[in-house]
Image: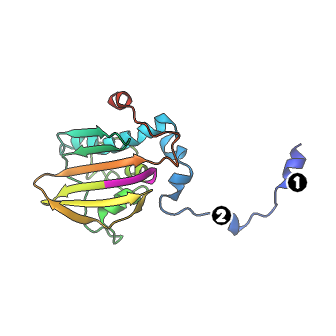
């Protein structure tokens, strides 16, 4: 049986078989590597990852409140009154917000300067949630302004734009899990409360 199996496989193995997945494509191809599963547990892990970012702001002493809202369309919104994700230009040329939301291993948790303690996946969480969402909108309140960027399946659909003025600070992330990835996208309030 083993010989028969190998006779069906090609012996060719060269550079053409080495694949490079760019951006958030690896997350969409193998979501279980990042969130464990695509069942209800994985679905609810998305919310945990976004909440962890708000908890980090609280643990660092910058956020007093975290609001979680589940909507009838099964989207979820997580908002805090922390400092707000930076929106200024990153050395990559992109907004720091876009980098945080679209690049794996990007965040303020690697050098112990922005956060002394943190939870979550250390810079992987928000971008993974974005990749596994049909859509995501992030609003950041900083410097007296409300900045916003929208994404579909991890890809920016708008630039970071100013959509209003405010005296508040903080980040609000709203997303809808992608039905192409998850077996079902019905959120369970009691699971999230736990």
Distance of mark 1 from mark 2, alpha carbons?
A: 22 Å
Residue 49 picture location, percent across and down = 37, 43
Disc 1 is placed on an element classified as helix
Q: Say if residue 103 shows up in the picture.
A: no
How packed is label 2: few (under 14 Cα within 10 Å), some, or many (20 or more)?
A: few
Query: How many tags in the picture?
Result: 2
Q: Is residue 94 magenta?
A: no
**Vertical arrangement, residue 147 with respect to residue 61, above or below:** below
Residue at 51%, 37% (x, y): give it: 39
Quadrant holding the C terminus: top left
Q: Which residue is mark 2?
A: 18
**Residue 100 marker:** none
Instruction: Indicate left or right for 114 with 42 as reference.
Output: left
Residue at 35%, 52% (x, y): give it: 110
Q: Pick whichever, 7 or 159, lies toward us.
A: 159
**Residue 7 marker:** 1
Q: Say if residue 95 shows up in the picture.
A: yes
For the magenta stretch, what is the residue range?
Answer: 131-137
Secondary structure mainly formed by the magenta segment: strand
Disc 2 is placed on an element classified as loop
**Vertical arrangement, residue 83 with respect to residue 88, above or below:** above
Residue 52 picture location, percent across and down = 32, 41
Instruction: Indicate left or right for 55 with 2 as reference.
Output: left
């Amino acid at each position: 049986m083993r010989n028969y199996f190998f006779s069906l496989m090609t012996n060719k193995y060269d550079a053409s078989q080495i694949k490079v997945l760019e951006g958030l494509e690896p997350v969409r191809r193998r979501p279980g590597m990042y969130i464990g599963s695509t069942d209800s547990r994985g679905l609810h892990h998305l919310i945990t990852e976004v909440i962890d970012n708000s908890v980090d702001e609280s643990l660092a002493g910058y956020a007093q409140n975290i609001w979680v809202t589940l909507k009838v369309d099964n989207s979820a919104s997580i908002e805090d009154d922390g400092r707000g994700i930076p929106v200024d230009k990153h050395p990559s040329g992109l907004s720091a917000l876009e980098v945080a939301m679209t690049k794996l291993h990007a965040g303020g948790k690697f050098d112990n300067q922005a956060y002394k303690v943190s939870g979550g996946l250390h810079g992987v969480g928000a971008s993974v949630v974005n990749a596994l969402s049909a859509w995501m909108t992030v609003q950041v309140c900083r410097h007296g302004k409300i900045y916003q960027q929208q994404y579909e399946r991890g890809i920016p659909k708008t630039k970071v734009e100013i959509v209003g003025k405010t005296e508040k600070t903080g980040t609000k992330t709203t997303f809808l899990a992608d039905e192409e990835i998850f077996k079902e996208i019905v959120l369970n309030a009691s699971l999230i409360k736990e």
